[in-house]
Amino acid sequence: MNAAIWHALVSGPLRAAPGRSMLAVVAIAIGVALGLAVHLINASAAGEFGRAARQLAGEADLVVQGGRTGFDEQLYPVVATMPGVAAASPVLELEATLHGRRDTLKIIGFDALRALALQPQLAGAGNGARNALFDADAIRLSASAAREMDIVVGGKVNFKVGMQSLTLHVVEILPDTSYRQRLGLMDIAAMQWRFDRTGFINRIDLRLATGVDAETFRRQLQTQLPPGVHAVTPQTDSERGLAVTRAYRLNLDMLALIALFTGTFMVFSSQVLVLLRRRTQIALLRTLGVTRSAVLGWLMAEGALLGLIGGLIGLGGGYVLAVQAMAFAGTDLGADYFRNLNAELIVEPLTLLAFLGLGMASAIIGAAVPAWDAARRQPADELHARDDGDTLHRPLWIAAGLVTMLTGALLALLPPLGGLPLPGYGAIALLLIGAVLLMPALTGILLSPASLPSFPALGLGLAQLKATPRHVAISVAAILVSFSLVVAMLIMVLSFRQSLDSWLDQVLPADLYLRAAASGETALLSPAEQQRIAGTAGVASVAFTRFQSLLIHADQPPLTLIARDLPSEGVSRSLPLVSPPVTVPPGAPPALWISEIAAAVFDWKTGQTVTLPVSGTARTFTVAGIWRDYSRQNGAAIISRDLYRAWTTDASANDAAIRLIHDTSAATAEQALRAALPATAAIEIVSAGTIRKISMGIFDRTFAITWALELAALIVGLFGVSVAFSIQALARRREFGVLRHLGMTRNQISAMLAGEGALTAGVGALSGLAVGTVIGIVLIHVINRQSFHWSMELHMPWLQLLALFIITAACASVTAVLSARSVMRSDTVAAVREDW
Amino acid sequence: MVPHNADAMLSLSHLHKSYPGPAPRTILHDINLELVPGDYIAIVGDSGCGKSTLLNLIAGLDLPDSGSVKLHSCDITGLDDNTRTRMRRRDIGFVFQAFLLLPYLTVLDNAALTLKLNGVTHREAQRKAYAELAAVGLSETIHRFPGTLSGGESQRVAVARALAHEPKLVLADEPTGNLDADSAEVVLQLLRDRVKAQRSIGILVTHSSAAAATADRIYRLHHGTLQPA
């Protein structure tokens, strides 16, 4: 019995029209592949990041740490001698600037003897050169660092410290097993000396005595630590690093799942149309005694089978895609979060099972509604049903659509959950589902006022669409889903790009920007070099900047403190403020301008008094204004450099913004500046235009993966349209035959179908434009705000939207014609005699 | 040799048609027929004897292996598909067993469809279609959709559609196969009357002897040959 039903309901029709099912399978496969690829890359990167952090912490129970600048080494003996501490190891960690290269090398300086107790994997790695460990010119490299820099034992590594070059000798290369990432190891005292950090460390790793409760000890220790220094567990340390990327990774996951969502919808649309064609067959089976639940069950099983096949293909595709994407765009898919991270793709069987299940669940969900609809119909009515019967027209659907959209709108107003914009994503999903539910009614409304053109081919096409709005709604909805998501992303990304462009205009007022180095913490401009820069011929004025990182909260990424030479005309005019600034009254704490990310993360407001740990001392400021910052995702705050120098005695600078005298060319000035500084300085001098170009390039690279995922969603959507048109073309074979009898040429029928396709796509794209704009606004004002805390202005990219509209309509027209042509290749003339 | 009638509007000469395959099957063998305007004939025969194939050849929907089909002295077997399609649009009307009205067009639009395909203006097409619908007694139903009509009404709309553009040739393939006896009688009478009124040629393919009896002459298609019954 079951085998007979299976054959009659599922395997027979599948074998008869494998192409129809194949497209649904492909859609699911694409969804699973994209989801799995993004997940594998994200999980591998996050796993490797966490593993690297744990390895550095070694066997420590707690880590005492400050900002990157570090803290006075005198804290070490205080902490190390506290009761309950079994072992302590002081650490200095720097991202050292590599001379002549644009990248950096993380160097860890530790006391080898003390570190043996806490980081035996690092301190004890290697066989020889123990004595050389204390050599001030010696460095040990991890295997990946040596490979990447193409250095062997005995070779040299050149660093940049201040404006000077520092050469260290490689005394040992660690085995791959000790630490997988790029890393250099030095004796801490030698490192302090050679990297000009005498007296400073930035970490103390602690192992507690047996029986000491780590959390109790941590709380007690925290009370003894100076401002800006925190005691945390190694896990908190690792999670803080990953927290920065969490929203980005979630965004990618969500984008990838959109393709799966579109796949679900494709299964839904193809099943609705296919089951319409099989109404009589199903009614016959019901008449012959097949129960309603059996029909429902087997049709759902058909969905599961499609999901299983698509899921299995998707798993293979996802793995290949992940390998290729990681090789092409890196472990962070182009976002530069894990620039130097070497991660291997780790594939867990459970992950594969989960994505296979996701693919199957998507297909089952897609098949469920049409299956239920087919099962609940009365066989007596359906035995004489025709293909053109209306379905999906239920007042309930309209009500459900409105309620779903309203719920979505309400979700968009909710705050983030656990720091992630989950309600926002829920809002987008509900807005889409609601719009799909409303499509049959909306299609009818949009098409009803259109009058039939006198040109017969177009007139017939429009008449067909007007008479079957529910069928048309399936195709329209397929376009709506994919088009609205692309529209939303287009609006969001181009709004962001436009906002970034305007922002760069404001934050790059100078003619030239001089940097001590492209990256790293060790290259700095000394006061004497700053003087030489200011005195260079052609230079009208210079504003120097010093960056520091401050750890405000133990579980938050460090804030960037920007000590700047403030312009005489006032900071307000030179900063892209997002709200009106306040004037700091005389006698009040000095002004602090915070980025909107800092305002969101630390919940600071304009006019509020806040305390920052500047060089180990708590300093109080008045928040004078909030400005937009697209370059530092952890938050930033600007203070006067004069104030900073007075408080810290640190007179060095990282950057200089240089305005030139009116008739001085940038090239002449650059030449003069290079001549004014030591030949070994290897400074970077770029124009505002170059920085703008680089910034826009980074932006475009970051969003390249987004576009790739969106393109995939659009292709899956067009698959959906293709499936819908193919099935409708099959159902209309006899109509095409009649039209051929009556004297319509194949070209006229093609024109009719092209018109239908264009009109269907037009309705879908118009609806998609409306829904996509709303989703775009949710992306800009909810998802982005809650994910990254930055704001942007809404810019409607009309030209791009128009181009997208035309392309979609053209693709849909071509798809409609191709679908029908394949049907017309068979004998449509004979089709008029079917069922005689 | 077939005697040649100078007044013949439709002339089938030595038509052969077979379907290829491992064992090729001859469907039509040396079919000859000449019809003048106003002729209304019936072709009868068993299922699968080739009646529909013959209609397809006459309509230019299929091509013979040999022989000619001349409509107004023009051999349509030598024409390309587009020219045959235009000829069909202009000179032939069809009535099918299953009516085959387009469900998304009103009765009036269905009847006006062939006129519009022939480039007749919307207004003129509607006027002529209305006149034809009135002639078949359906002037009250012009704004209804096919789904709301009875079988007899549907076939009368199909007759109106077949004749609205005043074709030279009307091909009716089992036009009463889906109708009850009363409706069948009405449709057959209307079809004959309208063909005669327009001085078209009517070819009725049917199983029904009652239907065939309404024709001027009856031919039997048997073993691929066409013989007067």
Image (tube, rainbow, N blue to C red):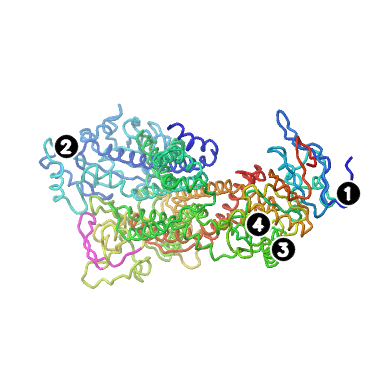
Quarter where residue A292 is shown: top left
Residue under label 4: B156
Asked whether the viewer can see residue A102, the reply is no
Please tell me which residue lies in front, A527 or B210: B210
Numbered label attached to residue B5 = 1
Residue under label 2: A87
Q: Mark 1: few, some, or many residues within 10 Å (few <14, many ≥20)?
A: few
| Image position of A58 with respect to A509: above or below | above
Residue A687: image x %, image y %? 47, 58
Q: Residue furthest top?
A: A127
| Contact, mark 3 vs mark 2 (Cβ under 8 Å) | no
Q: Mark 4: few, some, or many residues within 10 Å (few <14, many ≥20)?
A: many
1 vs 3, front mark: 1
Q: Mark 2: few, some, or many residues within 10 Å (few <14, many ≥20)?
A: some
Q: Mark 3: few, some, or many residues within 10 Å (few <14, many ≥20)?
A: some
Quarter where residue B22 is shown: top right
| Image position of A135 with respect to A73: above or below | above
State how far apart marks 3 and 4 are (Cα).
Answer: 22 Å
